[in-house]
Amino acid sequence: MAYEGFVADGWSAVAEAFAHNIESREDIGAGVAVFHKGECVVDIAGGYFDKEATQPYTRDTLQLVFSTTKGVVATAVAICVERGLLAYEQPVSLYWPEFAAHGKEHVTVAQLLSHQAGLYTVEGDLTYEQVLDWDTMVARLADTPPLFPVGSTHGYHAITFGWLAGELVRRVDGRSIGQFIAEEISGPLGGEIYVGLPQHHEPRVSPVNVGWPRNSNDPPPTPPAVMPNAHLARALTLNGALNVKGGFNRADMHAAQVPGANGIANARSLAAMYSATFTETQSPSGVVRLLNDNTRNKMTVQQTKDGEVDLCLQTQRTFAMGFVTPSEKLAFDAPGSYGHAGAGGSVSFADPGRQMGFSYIMNRMKDSMFTDPRAVRLIEAASRCADADANL
């Protein structure tokens, strides 16, 4: 068997797709989970914890999920909106006065969350150690002029999104974004989503890798089809500060709060979170719903223009309040769906039309962030199962 875990009747197609990913060696270690109508119907994991295949990848394994973390942060912001602590249409500077520097006083929360604020990196040089320090990063971002006219276009805030959105939560709630997520999202759902990993969990984190070990007679790896443009290179590396080999596998990175990219979780926790954004969802402690319909409708309003090419990603991508919305070349494309993918292939999202919350995580990094064929295979299988259930 290529996996261990739970698969409800009628959902075996997801397990079969997952087994294909493992047995074909497209995946090294991975997990997938699906919630349907508020109940867990798939929660499986399989393959290997590391590319040397020294131990199994299980449902107890934790995985760094890169930008899939952004959807968790966006959910935290939405909870604050529902509680009246934030409003999407208000200026960021209302809650974070220092942010007004360099002509940013009118940047709205909605613009910030939809990558329209022109802050995909900071002004000036950074060190890796500074990137791990919250106060340094939010101060530098507040003191950075927009890198393009606010609202003129959008450019993916690959790493900076987490500090920008997370500082909003801290300003209005008082808790760090990591503490807020633990106490308001993963805690009630009985899950594990960490932004700022407790040290004792570090041995459970599967290291990300780029593939199976190569033999000496293997052909050299194929270079990426598209090299990052200058905007994306600066956004991904923060002007070179993150050009540290193995930086995202380091314990100090895991322990820090870099919520644009360093969330650590399992598939079940992420799928449960998305389910709970639109329906009552079963948890070990009872039924949980994180957001009401009014808030969900607000947070999923598309903010960027149809057909607009993202300045950093150099592809068409549409954003709502921190969530990616359906568009071309997206692994999840059902009308009304919302979520986020991460570098390497992970993806988590909600499909309220199918009453489905979904998450796929993995340790083998591939080039296709939003269209990874492993994820597409799983999503298509889950969608077929949900549709079949609806037709019963």
Image (tube, helix red, strand yellow):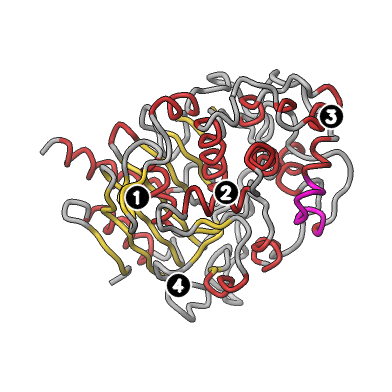
Residue underneath mark 1? 378
- Residue at 48 percent across and 30 percent down: it is 325
State which mark lies toward you, 4 or 2. Answer: 2
Q: Is residue 55 above or below residue 89?
A: below
Task: Tell me, yes or no, whether the highlighted magenta stretch contains residue 136.
Answer: yes
Labelled disc at residue 145 = 3
State which mark lies toward you, 3 or 2. Answer: 2
Q: How many angstroms separate mark 1 from mark 2 (CA)?
A: 30 Å
Give 220 or 324, whichever is nearer the viewer: 324
Give 234 or 137, whichever is nearer the viewer: 137
Residue underneath mark 2? 180
Q: How many angstroms separate mark 1 from mark 4 (CA)?
A: 19 Å
Kind of residue at disc 4: Tyr
State which tag comes first along the sequence, 4 or 3. 4
Q: Residues within 10 Å of mark 3 (few under 14, many from 20)?
A: some
Q: Where is residue 256 in the image (x, y as percent from the top left)?
A: 69, 59
State which tag comes first along the sequence, 3 or 2. 3
Q: How many angstroms separate mark 3 from mark 2 (CA)?
A: 29 Å
State which mark lies toward you, 4 or 3. Answer: 3
Residue underneath mark 4? 48
Quadrant in the picture for the N terminus: bottom left
Kind of residue at disc 3: Pro
State which tag comes first along the sequence, 1 or 2. 2
State which tag comes first along the sequence, 4 or 2. 4
State which mark lies toward you, 1 or 2. Answer: 2
> Quick one: which residue is furthest to the right in this view?
124
Highlighted magenta segment, given as a residue range: 129-137
